[in-house]
Image: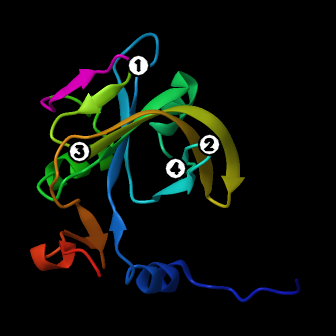
């Protein structure tokens, strides 16, 4: 494995910014206090059997420790018209849920109203990944709430699919 080149963070962000990512809000509820939530653009399916998802919270996040302690969370896949919700959960607001529609699921986690889909998980494992953590969640429940285009992040901005791009490939 030898020496690695010094890649400038600005160059890294610029190049990887040319790849669009979906936007999710991870929500959880500790035994006491208000619910916790954070916006992430680093969410992916990790395994079909068992069903596992992964996301990568920043080590400096003030919300991640609360989600980790809760041990159970919901991945809320945001719809293209939910940029304001994304911005709220990406902020350091004291109460990120203020004025945001949500309900507590049968599994005890906050589910945001109007999201494309909700994937409820138990925290399976956490490992270090540079300046982030790699969090694996075991899926315990999932549902599609809206068959609408998801919110995308691309080149430092938010956007959506064009309708024709949703046609099935033959």
Inter-mark Cα distance, 1 to 3: 24 Å
Q: Quadrant of residue 150?
A: bottom left
- From the image, tell me which residue sits under label 2: 50
Do callouts 1 and 3 mark residues in contact (Cβ within 8 Å)? no
Lateral position of residue 112 relative to residue 15, left or right: left
Lateral position of residue 149 relative to residue 76, left or right: left
Lateral position of residue 45 relative to residue 76, left or right: right
Q: Earlier in the sequence, mark 1 or mark 3?
A: 3
Quick one: label 3, few (<14), some, or many (20+) residues within 10 Å? some
Instruction: Work out which residue is located at the far front of the displayed protein and give it.
Output: 170
Do callouts 2 and 4 mark residues in contact (Cβ within 8 Å)? no
In magenta, the rendered stretch is 99-107
Question: Looking at the image, is 92 positioned above or below residue 24?
Answer: above
Q: Nearer the viewer, residue 24 or 144?
A: 144
Inter-mark Cα distance, 2 to 4: 22 Å
Q: Earlier in the sequence, mark 3 or mark 2?
A: 2
- From the image, tell me which residue sits under label 3: 88
Q: Earlier in the sequence, mark 2 or mark 4?
A: 2
Disc number lying in front (2 or 4): 2
Question: Looking at the image, is 131 positioned above or below residue 137?
Answer: below
- From the image, tell me which residue sits under label 4: 57
Do callouts 1 and 2 mark residues in contact (Cβ within 8 Å)? no
Mark sitting on residue 93: none
Inter-mark Cα distance, 1 to 2: 19 Å
Q: Earlier in the sequence, mark 4 or mark 3?
A: 4
Q: Nearer the viewer, residue 40 or 76?
A: 76
- From the image, tell me which residue sits under label 1: 107
Q: Nearer the viewer, residue 11 or 49?
A: 49
Q: Nearer the viewer, residue 53 or 87?
A: 53
- Work out whether residue 48 can be spotted: yes
Inter-mark Cα distance, 4 to 3: 16 Å
């Amino acid at each position: 494995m030898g020496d690695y080149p010094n890649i400038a963070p600005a160059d890294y962000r610029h190049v990887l910014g040319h790849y669009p990512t979906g936007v999710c809000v991870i929500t959880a509820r500790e035994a006491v206090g208000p619910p916790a939530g954070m916006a992430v653009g680093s969410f992916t399916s990790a395994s079909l059997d068992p069903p596992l998802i992964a996301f990568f919270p920043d080590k400096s996040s003030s919300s991640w420790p609360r989600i980790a302690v809760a041990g159970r969370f919901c991945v809320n896949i945001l719809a293209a018209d939910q940029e304001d919700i994304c911005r709220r959960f990406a902020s350091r607001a004291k109460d990120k849920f203020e004025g945001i529609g949500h309900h507590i699921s049968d599994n005890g986690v906050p589910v945001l109203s109007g999201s494309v889909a909700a994937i409820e998980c138990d925290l399976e494992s956490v490992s270090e990944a540079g300046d982030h953590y790699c969090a694996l969640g075991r899926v315990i429940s999932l549902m599609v709430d809206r068959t609408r285009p998801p919110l995308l992040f691309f080149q430092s901005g938010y956007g959506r699919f064009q309708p024709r791009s949703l046609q099935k490939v033959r």
